[in-house]
Every structure is written in C-alpha cells, then in structure tokens.
Image (spheres, rainbow, N blue to C red):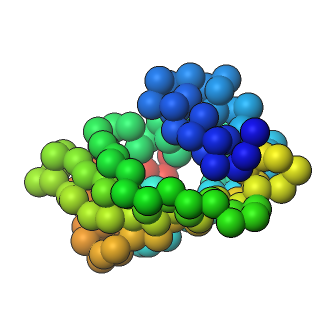
Amino acid sequence: MSNLQKIQAFFTAYAAKNVAGVREVMASDISWTIPGHHPLAGTKRGIDEVLAFFDQLGKANFKAQPLVVAENGDYVIDHHRGWSEEAGGLDLTWCLVFRFEGGKIKEVVNFCADQHLADLFFWKVYQLKPIPDRLA
C-alpha cells in the first residue's frame, strides 16, 4: 500500500470515527504540530495526544473538502478547504505535510492560509475556564 493510499485510509477512518483504523496508520511516537497561539496549538506527541486533539477539534464541527493530495517519497501533502460555522464561522485553506517512517505516519505539520484568523476562531470556540478553575 502506498503512502497516498495510507493517507486515504486515514481520512476514511477519521471520517468514520474509526479509532482503530486511525491508530493503524500512525507511528506510536507520532508528532502532530498545530501552529498558532490558541488553546489547541502546539505539538501533540504520541497517538493518545493526537486522538485527544482530534476529539477536541470535533467540537468545532469542521468540514473538509480535499483540493490536492500528492505523494513524493516519504511525504504526502494534503491541501484542503476546511470550514466551520461555529463561533461566527471560519473558511480557509489548509496544508498538512505528512512524513512517513517505517510505513507509518511519523510526523505531521499543519499550515493555515491565515493563521491570525484561525487563532481568533479557536479562541472563540475553546474559551479558557475562569480562574481559579483554569489553574486547578
């Protein structure tokens, strides 16, 4: 199975909320980087952290429309339109760079067409608890 086919299997499993299928294509020590300055930003390390991120991202009701998915050696690039109608809405293009190692997704970096707009959106959807609950 090519890396491109594995990415397609990943997307299919993710859309179906098939956690076992998602786990199957990821390296146990995967790193998934979400750029920005918002509550979901940062590098998630390991499958459990990545799955917890996906669970949180689901609360934003994101939809995706693939534009281009291409493979080159150990890399797959996914360029898609991603949008949500939550919190006033967001509609941007995104580019995910997947790097494979040993036949599994080892590293992912997500790039956004307008990071400032994405940051504003994520702060609206994922508001911090008030102090002292936030520090508990």
Q: Position of residue 98 (x, y in %)?
A: 64, 59
Q: Nearer the viewer, residue 43 or 30?
A: 30
* Residue that appears at 37% across and 57% down: 67
Within the image, what quadrant is residue 57 found in?
A: top left
Q: In this view, does 77 lie to the left or right of 3?
A: left
Is residue 120 among the parts visible in the rendering? yes
Is residue 123 among the parts visible in the rendering? no
Q: Where is residue 121 in the image (x, y as percent from the top left)?
A: 25, 60
Q: Nearer the viewer, residue 133 or 73?
A: 73
* Residue that appears at 34% across and 74% down: 113
* Residue that appears at 75% across and 39% down: 1
Q: Nearer the viewer, residue 62 or 132?
A: 62
Extreme right residue here?
102
Q: In this view, does 26 lie to the left or right of 9?
A: right
Q: In this view, does 67 lie to the left or right of 24?
A: left
Instruction: Classify 23 as above or below 50.
Output: above
Extreme left residue here?
88
Q: Where is residue 39 in the image (x, y as percent from the top left)?
A: 42, 58
* Residue that appears at 29% across and 39% down: 61
Instruction: Classify 126 as above or below 20.
Output: below
Q: Where is residue 109 in the image (x, y as percent from the top left)?
A: 58, 65
